[in-house]
Amino acid sequence: MLSYQHLYHAGNAADVHKHAALASALAYLTRKPKPLSYIETHAGRGLYDLTAPEAVKTGEAAAGITRLRAAFPEAHPYLQALARNPDHYPGSPALAHALLRPTDTLHLAELHPQEHAHLRQNLRAPNVHVYKQNGLEMAQSLCPPTPRRGLMLVDPSYEVKTEYEVLPKFLSTLARKWNVGVLMLWYPILTSQPHTPMLADLKTRFPDALTHEVAFPPARDGHRMVGSGLFVVNPPYGLQTELAALSALFKKAA
């Protein structure tokens, strides 16, 4: 949805969950020297100034990365990515770029004109390809990518309610075209639980996939997001163990 700008929400508890899991997955995938593809369907601007009025206004970063950062072990790849972007909070494209290698290829889609312009400015590198295009359409056109080994992150804003209905079929189509790809879908856990039918559909289509959820307090009075979820098709080895540690971290910081 073209009204959505992630600057208001950057660094929130859901970002911490999603980005820490993504960092763990990429850290495992890059242990092997073979190059890989990284695809992101809703990239945003890549880097976020958490001192900007938009970020301060919502208080979500204060309830997220500011509160949770000290709970991570120093060796966690998420902290490594944060350290490589000391002046800004790295969204998932910048985090992936910080952890990937020059031999890996990144494909990033962002349809919002302003966010797309920021993304092109913030992530300029020979191995980064930025698309001003619907992210699901971009992913369909690229898959299977070259190299075939790799990961796709799908994390829409869910401001368009039909996204909950479209995504299970989308992932099924992608999995058939790219059967070796790691497909990571993020979803918010809201007080109204709109993700429940989508998750049931996904589990029917992908009985061997990994589901991981964390709960956290609302960032402010009346805020409807009380948790964050990930659904991972073809999860990398060891990711389930990493996510269990992440659950413990969130519970400890609660």
Image: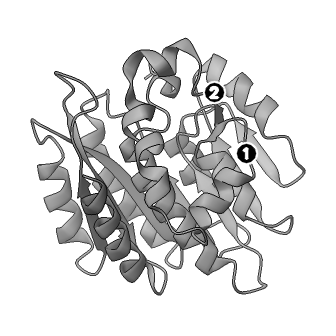
Q: Residue furthest front?
A: 70
Q: Is residue 185 above or below residue 232?
A: above
Q: Secondary structure at mark 2?
A: loop
* 5 relative to 129 in the view: left or right: left
Q: Which residue is mark 2?
A: 49
For the residue marked with disc 1, what is the amino acid? Asn
Name which residue lies at 25% across and 34% down: 162
Q: Is residue 16 above or below residue 200?
A: above
* 148 relative to 236 in the view: left or right: right
**In the image shown, does 152 or 24 lie closer to the viewer?**
24
For the residue marked with disc 2, what is the amino acid? Asp
Q: Residue furthest right?
A: 126
Tag of residue 85: 1
Q: Secondary structure at mark 1?
A: loop
Residue 71 place in picture, x, y as percent: 43, 60
| Mark 1 closeness class: few <14, some 14–19, many ≥20 residues within 10 Å | some
Displayed quadrant of residue 117: top right
**In the image shown, does 179 or 40 lie closer to the viewer?**
40
Mark 2–mark 1 distance (CA, rounded to whole Å): 11 Å
